[in-house]
Image (cartoon, rainbow, N blue to C red):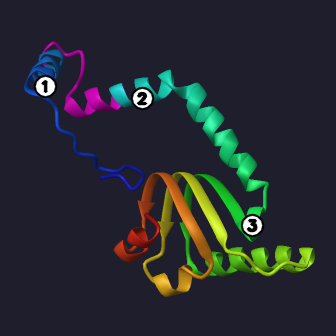
Amino acid sequence: MADDTEKVSINVGAMDLANIDLLIEKTVYKDRTDFFRTAARNQVDKHAYLIESSIKDYQKEDDIDALLVKCLFWIGSQTLDRQELNTIYSQAEAISKKKGESTGQVKIVVFGKLEIDKDITLSEIKDKIQSIKVFGIFRASQEIKNFYK
């Protein structure tokens, strides 16, 4: 499996699956994966306006330091290692000091993929990151994933 894909399992009714298999036999689709990828892309395209407006809403939130929480908004693939985690928190501290506020935690929103290095422990991250919301692929230790559910 490619690094930027995620395996998804779904239950499909017998008649729907029969129709899909018939389309594959008639070479409309290469295989079931091709059918479901095409169906997913078509639905994403169909709702593109909602996706775009939602992304804009999250970008606006990125500009607001509400309740001393700094919001980071990332699109694409991002790896969070210990150095990046400390840099993010140091920047949040600097912003807070400049404003004369106490340091708040950071909120992270990702559209794409977020990978948190396996050497980062929950105890290291939970005092610096208030919340993590990933639309896409979230790779981290199970402990971190469970904490930020």
Kind of residue at badge 2:
Arg
Residue wearing tag 3: 67
Q: Give SS at disc 1.
A: helix
Q: Is residue 142 magenta?
A: no
Crowdedness near tag 3: few (<14), some (14–19) or many (≥20) residues, C-alpha within 10 Å: few
Sequence-first tag of 2 and 1: 1
| Along the viewing direction, whichever of 55 and 118 lies nearer the viewer | 55
Compared to residue 80, the image places residue 114 above or below, namely above
**SS category of the residue bearing label 3:** helix
Q: Quadrant of residue 91?
A: bottom right
Mark 1 neighbour class, 10 Å CA radius: few under 14, some 14 to 19, many 20 or more: few
Residue 115 percent coordinates (x, y): 48, 65
Q: Nearer the viewer, mark 3 or mark 1?
A: 3
The 10 Å Cα crowd at callout 2, few under 14, some 14 to 19, many 20 or more, is: few
Highlighted magenta segment, given as a residue range: 25-38
Give the mark nearer the N terminus: 3 vs 1.
Answer: 1
The alpha-carbon separation of the residues under discs 3 and 1 comes to 50 Å
Task: Point out residue 18 in the picture as x, y percentages from the top left corner.
Answer: 9, 21
User: In the displayed structure, does residue 33 sit left or right of residue 66?
Assistant: left
- Residue 113, percent across and down? 49, 55
In percent of the image, x 62 and y 38: which residue is there?
54
The amino acid type found where label 3 is placed reads Leu
Q: Residue at x 29, y 52 (%)?
A: 1
Residue position for label 2: 41
Is 72 drawn above or below residue 28 in the view shown? below
* Residue 77 horizontal/vertical position (percent): 54, 55
Q: Are marks 3 and 1 in contact (CB under 8 Å)?
A: no
Above or below: residue 76 compared with residue 97: above
Report the residue marked by disc 1: 17
